[in-house]
Amino acid sequence: MKKSIISAILLLLLIGTLGFYINDAKVKRSSFFKVNKNIEKIVLINKDFDLYLKNTLSYDNFDIIQYKITSFKNELQEINDNKILQNIQNNKLKTALKKLEETIKIKFEIISRVKSYRAILNNSFRIVQKIKNQGILNDFNNLYTIIMTVDKNPELDIKQELINVDKLIPLYENKYKKYFLKHSQIILQYQIKFVALETSLNQLEINQKLERLHKLYEQYSQNSIQKAQAAIAVLFILLVLSIILYLVFEYKLRLSNKELSKFRQTVENSDNIVVITDENEVIKYVNEAFTKTTGYTSKEIVGQKPSILKSGKQTKEFYKELSDTIHGGKKWSGEFINIDKYGNLSYEKASITPVLDDEGNIKEFISIKLDITNETIKGQQLKEQEKLLVQQSKMAAMGEMLENIAHQWRQPLSVISTISTGIIVQKEFGISNEKDEIKALNKINDTAQYLSGTINDFRDFFKPNKQKALFNLKDAYIKTLHLVDSKFQTLKIEVVENLNDIELNNLSNEVVQVIMNLLNNARDVLETKENQKRLIFIDIYKKDNNAIVKIKDNGGGIPDDIIDKIFDPYFTTKHKAQGTGIGLYMSQEMIIKHLKGSLTVNNSTYEYKNYSYTGAEFILTLPIK
């Protein structure tokens, strides 16, 4: 709303400014034409003055000259009274006008003198003409002609003629002749004065000054008009742009209002819980999802604080950290364990964002929450299930290991039993000797030591160790094979190895467990195959930054319709007495979550010693770093 008012005010100011400049341009234009007209009139009147001054001896209409002088002064006064000229900062134009005024003043003084001279000359001309018309002065015809054309003969040497007249005056006694010569003398004298005045007028250079004034004013006027036009053009463009921007702003505002309306509807109908509180955390608004989740209606909850939903399952430190974060102007994200209107626990994933005003003060808080109660409960159930799976996996592994122990110990115990029984029989029949007894006892001791070493291997297998450490992958495999080797020998399984030394920094026991599980699975498959060679291929090598363990057999492979399911929990193709279906699932979980590697399977067809075989190929990939 504020932006709309500011935009409207700025638009009105722009329109007002444009109107002012347009009016100012009109005034300046009108003033330009008026002053220009004044200057043109002055130029014309000045030409009349020049014409008058050139024809002084024949010009006798002094009233017109006086009228023109008055007109000249009036036009000049109008120029001086022009407000625009009074306020201009153009020093050249002001100086030109001032010099013109000073020069005109001198010219008017000259014209005034010319008028006085003209009065004297008119009297002398009348006397000269009168005497000449009486026919008395026939011998002065030449002088008369000179006198009557004195102002029209530029080649005449007036001073010389005046000297000649001065010489003639003493020679004549006739009063008419003396009058004629005296007044001829006056006419010549004043003609010399007129020539001097004309020289003074020429030195005044009024026409040039008028022309300069006219040119300067015209330049100034054109510049002023151009500036005004440029300002008007710029303002007009700005006005057009402002109107366009204003219309765009209004259009966007309408779109924004529509989007805001849609947003409000979206918020109201959203599955996410939306809660808005004031700066004191008093609830101002909740959407429909809040009511569905908590059971509180808008009327019941508005005016309350969100603490009404506290379940007591979260610590004071949790709520303090939340409060410090949002009141510090930062966004908070986390999970709530709340209680609804009916006392049921609910779990919510939430983010609370403080909304700031223009001064940076907190105005309100917007909380957007997602009800994750079902997911949380399912997650808890899944964790319990995973714990059960892990326990079952451990029990299965323990059963497998106990079976391996029993199988591994059967032959050594048989050897001990046979030797000890043999010694007893020999003692009974009296055929024993000390050398054979010592040899037999040494054999019993060696076998017991073997059993003791086997116990250590099995104990290491079950030892809990979650600390990553450096170990050799090849050595880990050999250790694993040693634990299951007795069964492999019983089933006559040939192990074909291609092993490389690779150092890993990881959980060695987990790696051993996964490899043992894969070896046992291969063994179980081969145990069902009668009348064929039983093969297991082991490859350990490095690729890029990973260590690769490939274990494949020649058991015929995994059926295509179940190969994608073998890593699912509780999926098994074995009889219930043979397996639980969690071995491969737990192996993959262990590889991905604990060892940060991957475990994949595919069916592989290959040749070995000129025979073609098909079997399952498990690929264990572990990061070296």
Image: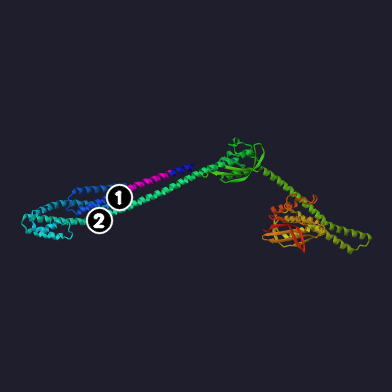
Question: Is residue 420 rendered magenta in the image?
Answer: no
Quadrant housing residue 175: bottom left
Residues at circles 2 and 1 in contact by the CB criterion of under 8 Å? no
Would residue 237 be found to the left or right of residue 278 on screen? left
Tell me the tag on residue 205.
Answer: 2
| Residue under pointer 1 | 36
| Element on which disc 2 rests | loop
Camera sees residue 85: no
First to last magenta residue range: 12-37
Question: Is residue 23 rendered magenta in the image?
Answer: yes
Quadrant housing residue 297: top right
Q: Mark 2 or mark 1: which comes first in sequence? A: 1
* Residue at the (13%, 55%) spot, across then down: 186
| Residue 548, placed above or below residue 266 | below
Amino acid under label 2?
Glu
Q: What secondary structure prevails in the magenta region?
A: helix
